[in-house]
Amino acid sequence: MSDRYAFIDDPDLPGWKRWDNGDETRFSALLGPVWGRLIDDRRALVRMVPERRHSNLRDSTHGGALLAFMDVALFAAAHSLGVMEGGGAATLDLSAQFIGTSRIGDPIVAEVELLRETGRLLFMRGLVKQDENILASFTGTMRKSSPPK
């Protein structure tokens, strides 16, 4: 795992690890707390709770906030799955389809699946849900950085 990120057991959410980048001045901190947990060796769950600051005028999660969450979910899932231990990564592409609306204040969860890993590339896909309602589907490709020297 990169020394910039830590997954810390959360006593308030048994089975979940809080993802902490250690720097509240970074963009991902705008999402608020993010948690991850493994489903199996190819899939992970990533969770956040949308707040009013993430809402649109319809009191649903703003599409931009959902896109940011999907991007962070790719990284958090890759770290949870242990496929980005040597350094960071860059998002090469992220494609999303918005399907439904959410309630502010209730958790949303991205189920992220690692489809394929090559030497430097990760091909992933996921669904963002709130309870049983699908909010969005997404696919993404990440390029792993070279390990620090």
Image (tube, rainbow, N blue to C red):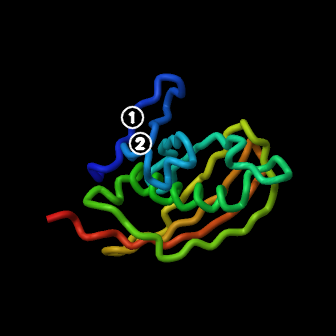
Number of other residues with Cα within 10 Å of mark 2, as a class: few under 14, some 14 to 19, many 20 or more: some
Determine which of the numbered discs, if any, sits on residue 20 in the image: 2
Task: First in sequence, mark 2 or 1: give its number.
Answer: 1
Residue 140 appears at what percent x and percent y?
Answer: 54, 70
Instruction: Say left or right for 111 vs 129.
Output: left
What is the C-alpha distance between the residues marked 2 and 1?
A: 8 Å
Q: Residue at 29% of width from left, 56% of height from top?
A: 85
Helix, strand or loop for disc 2: strand
Q: Which residue is mark 1?
A: 8
Q: Is residue 38 above or below residue 28?
A: above
Residue 51 appears at what percent x and percent y?
Answer: 68, 41
Q: State which quarter of the image contains the C terminus.
A: bottom left
Q: In the rendered picture of this protein, how many numbered marks are placed on residues?
A: 2
Farthest front residue? 25
Name the residue nearer the viewer: 31 or 87.
31
Disc 1 residue type (three-letter): Ile
Q: Are marks 2 and 1 in contact (CB under 8 Å)?
A: yes
Farthest right residue? 58
Name the residue nearer the viewer: 15 or 53.
53
Instruction: Say left or right for 88 vs 80.
Output: left
